[in-house]
């Protein structure tokens, strides 16, 4: 069984943790033995004990300084004993012998605005024949000129490259003259039933109907008023996952659970859109506010919506958004999912061998 080391962002971001788990499970189903290589040691026993103590201690003193749900979710990840720091310095030169391949992806592993993540994602510590990119994202529509030479040199040494959005394919072509394949984000490569297995009931699920609001950007009164009106039409409450004191305990597993039971979703995020589609939830995607300097999200959202023929779910102005049918034909979505999952399987066969 071929051993694969997964290099990805390891951060407290719901989409990041879910895509890490999904890529692991997808590769397992294909007959490989994947392990995620972190930037620090992951001690399962310590995490379990620490989370148990913190959970009940914080409940006793009513303090909200530690969200143990993230650590609990990461118990689903198969972690390697090998550590590679973000600067990728002082890496054991024998690390390449521990795995047959290294796969970098998905998420914004090559975003120059998050450069502190990038060195380990270039896989310089691996042999060129071991370097695979799976649905990797640059998080920008164009590569800044100051980074072009470094990125061209590093990416030119990859055996196989696949990216998550159309803009990424264009960047790879420009820098390396290689043809990168555009693949689905790993979160879409495993089934809804598989996601339900890792979902955990959220303490903050209302007894009544509710909609999910998942905004990574700043709040907007105009957006909030619009979402409130839509929720009222549905007779539903609003669960604001990231902008509410009541929802601080929500982690990746609780996020999946809330999506499973929601009436609709209002998002400004890529993975918020992904799980709306996966769980067949009426949804709208809003332009993100207040995240200048971190990259343009338009390409990844546009690629996702275009892939499934759901372009009308993108909110360009609130007046026209009132006329949008938030529902969609799930049968057509399933047809596209089947085709795109096949494309991902074929890429894996070419990259890693059967």
Image: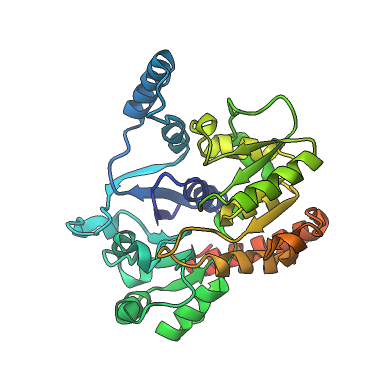
Render colour scheme: rainbow
Picture quarter with the C terminus: bottom right
Location of residue 206 by image quarter? top right
Q: Is residue 180 visible?
A: no
Single out the residue that lies furthest toward the left.
Answer: 90
Location of residue 311 by image quarter? bottom right
Single out the residue that lies furthest toward the top.
Answer: 60
Q: Is residue 229 left or right of residue 266?
A: right
**Residue 188, image x and y in percent?**
62, 54
**Residue 264, image x and y in percent?**
73, 44
Location of residue 307 by image quarter? bottom right
Which one is in front, 223 or 197?
A: 223
Residue at x 45% of width, y 31% of height: 72
Which one is in front, 341 or 254?
A: 254
Residue at x 33% of width, y 72% of height: 128
Which one is in front, 340 or 100?
A: 340
Q: How many marks?
A: 0
Residue at x 64% of width, y 64% of height: 304
Above/below status of 89 relative to 25:
below
Q: Is residue 10 visible?
A: yes
**Residue 93, image x and y in percent?**
20, 60
**Residue 198, image x and y in percent?**
58, 36
Above/below status of 73 relative to 305:
above
Above/below status of 96 relative to 34:
below
Which one is in front, 225 or 29?
A: 225
Residue at x 55% of width, y 36% of height: 253
Q: Is residue 23 left or right of residue 201?
A: left
């Amino acid at each position: 069984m071929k051993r694969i080391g997964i290099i990805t962002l390891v951060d407290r971001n719901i989409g990041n943790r879910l895509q890490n788990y999904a890529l692991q499970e997808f590769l397992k189903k294909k007959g490989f033995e994947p392990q995620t290589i972190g930037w620090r040691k992951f001690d399962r026993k310590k995490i379990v004990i620490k989370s148990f103590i913190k959970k009940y201690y914080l409940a006793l003193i009513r303090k909200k300084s530690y969200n143990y749900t993230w650590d609990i979710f990461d118990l689903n990840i198969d972690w390697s004993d090998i550590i590679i720091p973000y600067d990728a310095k002082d890496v054991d030169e024998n690390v390449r012998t521990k795995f047959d391949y290294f796969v970098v992806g998905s998420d914004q592993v090559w975003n120059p605005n998050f450069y502190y993540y990038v060195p380990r994602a270039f896989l310089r510590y691996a042999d060129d024949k071991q370097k695979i990119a799976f649905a990797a994202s640059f998080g920008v529509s164009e590569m800044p000129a100051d980074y072009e030479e470094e990125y061209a040199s590093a990416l030119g040494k990859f055996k196989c490259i696949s990216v998550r959005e159309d803009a990424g394919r264009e960047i790879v072509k420009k820098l390396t003259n290689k043809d990168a394949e555009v693949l689905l984000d790993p979160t879409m490569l495993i089934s809804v039933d598989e996601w339900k297995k890792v979902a955990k009931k959220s303490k903050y699920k209302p007894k009544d109907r509710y909609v999910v609001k998942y905004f990574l950007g700043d709040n907007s009164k105009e957006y909030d008023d619009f979402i409130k009106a839509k929720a009222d039409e549905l007779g539903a409450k609003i669960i604001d996952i990231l902008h509410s004191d009541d929802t601080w305990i929500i982690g990746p597993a609780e996020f999946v659970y809330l999506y499973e039971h929601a009436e609709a979703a209002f998002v400004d995020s890529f993975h918020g859109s992904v799980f709306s589609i996966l769980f067949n939830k009426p949804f709208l995607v809003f332009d993100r506010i207040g995240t200048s300097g971190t990259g343009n999200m338009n390409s990844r959202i546009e690629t996702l919506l275009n892939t499934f023929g759901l372009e009308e779910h993108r909110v360009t102005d609130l007046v026209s958004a009132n006329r949008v049918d938030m529902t969609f034909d799930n049968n057509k979505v399933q047809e596209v999912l089947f085709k795109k999952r096949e494309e991902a399987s074929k890429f894996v066969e070419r990259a890693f061998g059967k």
